[in-house]
Image (cartoon, rainbow, N blue to C red):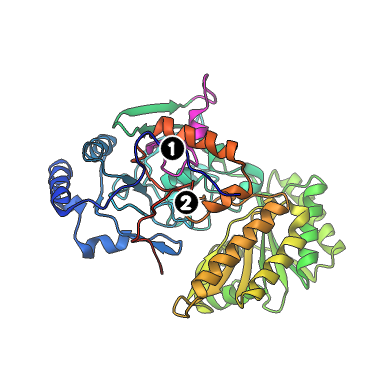
C-alpha cells in the first residue's frame, strides 16, 4: 500500500535558505545568544549533519540556547523567516530523527543540561532536556533513588532525546518506556509560545498531552523542561547469565519465563557473533562458543528475588541451558551489564559499519523471526548479529556492511525493510524505542492503514501547521532534500 500525505495548508517543502537570508538570520540569532553560540561555517556544521543512523544532511545554522526563553525567541526568528527547526540531543538517535533534511536551524541542548529540582518525598525530578540520562541516576543514587529508563546509550544520550523518541532500555520489561516515567513537560510551540502540559501530580484532567508529545520526535513541539518520576533503589538485585547452545532454546526460555508469571526487571539476549565482539572489547566473561546467552536481572525484596532466581534457573535448565551463572558481587554484575551496553560499539571490532533495526514481535514468535532475519541477511550476502531486549520482543539485528563496497548500502536498506515486514507479519511492529524518523517512514504502511495515517497527520497539522518543526519525519513527504546522502 502506498501512503498519501495529507495535503498541507502550506507547502511542507523548504528550499535551502539563500546566503543573504542566512546572514540575516545569523545576525538575529547572534544578537540573541551571542556569536559563539551560533554556528554557521561549513567546518562547524559538519558535526551536526548526522546522528547514529546512516543518513546525513547539513544544517544551515546550529544554535545552543541556555534557557526556555532563548528557545522561544529562536523559534520566533525561524517562523518569521520560514526556516525549519530541528531539535537535537546528543545525536545518538538511530532513525535519523535529528537529521535536518531541509537544512534550517538545529537547536542543540548542550547548555540546557541541569537538574532543576529533586523532590524525594514525592518521587519527582525536574530536568532540562540536555541532561545526560545517566547523570540523573548518578545524582539520585546516593540518596537511594534512581531514574528507570536506561537506553544502552545512557552514558551519552539525553533525557530530552529520550522523550522525543520514547526511548526504552533493558529495564522497560517491568517498568515501561520513557512515557511511563514522564509526568509533565514544558514546551515551546511553533508560534514561540511557552506552554506547560501535565505536572507534578500523578494525573491531570483533560487530554493526555504529555503522552501525545512524548515520542512525537520533535514534530509537534520543542521540549524545554521535563518532570520525571523517580523510584527507590531495590532492596536486592540479582543478575545472571544463562548460556545456550541454540537460539531456539534461549528464545523458548524467554517465553516460558514470562508465561509463568515471573517478570524479571530485564531479559537481554546476545548471539554468538555479538558475544565474540563483546568479549574481545569488554572481557565480561561471556562464553564465545555459545549460540546465545540471556542476561537476566531480578530485583525487589530479598525473599522475592531469591524465589524468582530459583524459578528462572529451573526454567533455563528445562530448556537445556549449558550453565546459569549468577553474578557473585556488584563488580561482576556491572561487568555483565557493561558487556551488554557496549555491544553496539564492540561491533566496530568486526565491521567498519552496521545498520541496526528496531522491530518488535510477540515473544512466542522469536524463534521464527530470528531464523527469518538470518535468512534475509544471507540472501543479500550480509552478516548479522543479534543483541536485543528479549523480554519484550524488541529486536535489534545489527546488519554489518561497508559503504565503500558498491551497492552494499542499498542491500542493507532492503534487508532492513524485509526484516521489519517480517516483524509486522508476525504480529509485531516496526519500532520499539528508536522511533520512525526518516528511516521507517515507508514502513509505517506495514502497520497502519490510510485512515490511521491521515488522522495522525491531522494531529501534526493542528500542532505544527506550517511544518516548521522537524519537517519530513514520521510520514512520507515529497521532495526530500537532495542533500540527504548515504554514508
Of residues 487 and 255, the one drawn nearer to the viewer in this rendering: 487
Furthest residue toward top: 205
Q: Secondary structure at mark 2?
A: loop
- Location of residue 267 (image quadrant): bottom right
The answer to whether any part of residue 379 appears in the image is yes
Q: Position of residue 99 (x, y in %)?
A: 38, 55
Of the two numbered discs 2 and 1 on the same chain, state the one appearing first in sequence. 1
According to the picture, the residue beneath numbered tag 1 turns out to be: 7
Answer whether residue 203 is magenta in the image. yes
In the picture provided, is 438 more to the left or to the right than 311?
left
In the picture provided, is 130 more to the left or to the right than 376?
left
Q: How many marks?
A: 2
Q: Secondary structure at mark 1?
A: loop
Determine crowd level at label 1: few under 14, some 14-19, many 20+ residues with C-alpha closer than 10 A: few
Say which mark, if any, is on residue 181. none
Q: Position of residue 273 (x, y in %)?
A: 63, 75
Say which mark, if any, is on residue 437. 2
Answer whether residue 177 is magenta in the image. no
Q: Is residue 38 above or below residue 385?
A: above
Q: Over which residues does the magenta segment extend?
A: 201-229
Real-space Cα separation, disc 2 to disc 1, in angstroms: 20 Å
Determine crowd level at label 2: few under 14, some 14-19, many 20+ residues with C-alpha closer than 10 A: many
In the picture provided, is 56 more to the left or to the right than 321?
left
The answer to whether any part of residue 238 appears in the image is no
x 53%, y 58%: residue: 152
Furthest residue toward right: 318
Question: Mark 2 against mark 1, which lies toward the viewer?
Answer: 1
x 37%, y 39%: residue: 467
Quarter of the rendering occupied by the C terminus: bottom left
Of residues 188 and 428, the one drawn nearer to the viewer in this rendering: 428
Q: Position of residue 376 (x, y in %)?
A: 66, 69
Tag 2–tag 1 contact (CB < 8 Å)? no
Amino acid at each position: 500500500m502506498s501512503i498519501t500525505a495529507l495535503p498541507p495548508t502550506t507547502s511542507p517543502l523548504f528550499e535551502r535558505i539563500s546566503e543573504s537570508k542566512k546572514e540575516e538570520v545569523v545576525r538575529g540569532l547572534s544578537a540573541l545568544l551571542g556569536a559563539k553560540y551560533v554556528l554557521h561555517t561549513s567546518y562547524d556544521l559538519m558535526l551536526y549533519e548526522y546522528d547514529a543512523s546512516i543518513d546525513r544532511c547539513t544544517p544551515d545554522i546550529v544554535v545552543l540556547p541556555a534557557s526556555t526563553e532563548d528557545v522561544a525567541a529562536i523559534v520566533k526568528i525561524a517562523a518569521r523567516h520560514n526556516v525549519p527547526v530541528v531539535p537535537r540531543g546528543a545525536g545518538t538517535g538511530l532513525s535519523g530523527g535529528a537529521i535536518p533534511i531541509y537544512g534550517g536551524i538545529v537547536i542543540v541542548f548542550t547548555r540546557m543540561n541541569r537538574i532543576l529540582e529533586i523532590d524525594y518525598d514525592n518521587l519527582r525530578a525536574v530536568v532540562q532536556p540536555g541532561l545526560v540520562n545517566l547523570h540523573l541516576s548518578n545524582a539520585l543514587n546516593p540518596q537511594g533513588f534512581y531514574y528507570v529508563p536506561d537506553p544502552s546509550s545512557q552514558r551519552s544520550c539525553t533525557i530530552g532525546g529520550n522523550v522525543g523518541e520514547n526511548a526504552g532500555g533493558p529495564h522497560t520489561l517491568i517498568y515501561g518506556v520513557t512515557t511511563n516515567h514522564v509526568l509533565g513537560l514544558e514546551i515551546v510551540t511553533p508560534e514561540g509560545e511557552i506552554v506547560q502540559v501535565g505536572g507534578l501530580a500523578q494525573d491531570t484532567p483533560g487530554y493526555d498531552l504529555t503522552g501525545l508529545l512524548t515520542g512525537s520526535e520533535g514534530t509537534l513541539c520543542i521540549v524545554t523542561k521535563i518532570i520525571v518520576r523517580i523510584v527507590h533503589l531495590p532492596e536486592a538485585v540479582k543478575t545472571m547469565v544463562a548460556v545456550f547452545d541454540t537460539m531456539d532454546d534461549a528464545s523458548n526460555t524467554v517465553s516460558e519465563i514470562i508465561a509463568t508469571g515471573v517478570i524479571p526487571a530485564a531479559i537481554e539476549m546476545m548471539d554468538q557473533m555479538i558475544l565474540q565482539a563483546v568479549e574481545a572489547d569488554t572481557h565480561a566473561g561471556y562464553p564465545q562458543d555459545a549460540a546465545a546467552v540471556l542476561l537476566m536481572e531480578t530485583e525487589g525484596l530479598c525473599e522475592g528475588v531469591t524465589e524468582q532466581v530459583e524459578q528462572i534457573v529451573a526454567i533455563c535448565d528445562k530448556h537445556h541451558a549449558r550453565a546459569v551463572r549468577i553474578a557473585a558481587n556488584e563488580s561482576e554484575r556491572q561487568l555483565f551489564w557493561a558487556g551488554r551496553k557496549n555491544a553496539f560499539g564492540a561491533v566496530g571490532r568486526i565491521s567498519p559499519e552496521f545498520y541496526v533495526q528496531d522491530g518488535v514481535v510477540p515473544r512466542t514468535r522469536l524463534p521464527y523471526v530470528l531464523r527469518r532475519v538470518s535468512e534475509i541477511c544471507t540472501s543479500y550476502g550480509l552478516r548479522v548479529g543479534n543483541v536485543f531486549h528479549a523480554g519484550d520482543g524488541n529486536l535489534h539485528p545489527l546488519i554489518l556492511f561497508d559503504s565503500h563496497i558498491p551497492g552494499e548500502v542499498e542491500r542493507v536498506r532492503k534487508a532492513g525493510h524485509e526484516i521489519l515486514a517480517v516483524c509486522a507479519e508476525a504480529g509485531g511492529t516496526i519500532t520499539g524505542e528508536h522511533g520512525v524518523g526518516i528511516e521507517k517512514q515507508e514502513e509505517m504502511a506495514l502497520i497502519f492503514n490510510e485512515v490511521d495515517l491521515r488522522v495522525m497527520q491531522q494531529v501534526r497539522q493542528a500542532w505544527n501547521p506550517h511544518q516548521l518543526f522537524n519537517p519530513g519525519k514520521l510520514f512520507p513527504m515529497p521532495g526530500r532534500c537532495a542533500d540527504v546522502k548515504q554514508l
